[in-house]
Amino acid sequence: MSKDKVSFRCMLPREQVACWLESLAQGIRSGCVRLEGNDGRGLCLAPSPVFEVEAKAKLKDARAKLEMELEWTTSGPLMGEL
C-alpha cells in the first residue's frame, strides 16, 4: 500500500485557528477531511465512524502546548490526493 502524506506548519491568529478547527469538525461530520500541505499538495481522508483519540496538554513557564491525535482504520481506500 502506498503512503501519501502532507503536512503544514504556520502561525495563525486565534480566530483563524478556531475556523480551521470548525472546518475539521465539519469534514469529520461530512465524511471528507481535507488537508493541504505547505507544498500545495493535499489529501482527502474518509473518516470511519469510530476514532482513537489522544490528547496532551502542557504548560511550562509562559509556553502552553496542546497536542491532539485522531486515528482510525479505513474499510476501503482513502480518497487520496486532491
Image (tube, rainbow, N blue to C red):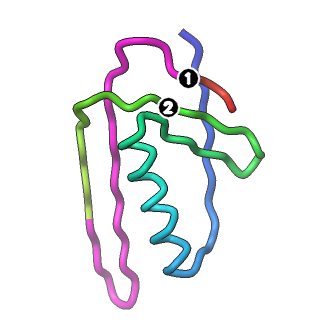
Return the residue found at the far right.
39
Q: Which region is colored magenta?
A: 57-79
Q: Is residue 15 magenta?
A: no
Return the residue found at the far front.
30
Report x, y in % for residue 80: 60, 24
- The vertical placement of 58 against 41, above or below, is below
For the residues marked 1 and 2, what is the alpha-carbon distance in whole angstroms?
6 Å
Of mark 1 and mark 2, the one earlier in the sequence is 2
Q: Amino acid at mark 2?
A: Leu
Report x, y in % for residue 30: 41, 39
Q: Which residue is mark 2?
A: 45
Report x, y in % for residue 25: 39, 52
- The vertical placement of 76 against 32, above or below, is above
Mark 1 packing: few (<14 Cα in 10 Å), some, or many (20+)?
few
Report x, y in % for residue 68: 33, 55
Q: Quadrant of residue 21?
A: bottom left
> Which residue does the image show at 45% across and 52% down from the upper left?
24
- Is 36 situated left or right of 14 in this image? right
- Is 36 situated left or right of 13 in this image? right
Comparing 19 with 58, the one in front is 19
Mark 2 packing: few (<14 Cα in 10 Å), some, or many (20+)?
some
Q: Which residue is mark 1?
A: 79
Q: Amino acid at mark 1?
A: Met
Q: Secondary structure at mark 2?
A: strand
Q: Is residue 78 magenta?
A: yes
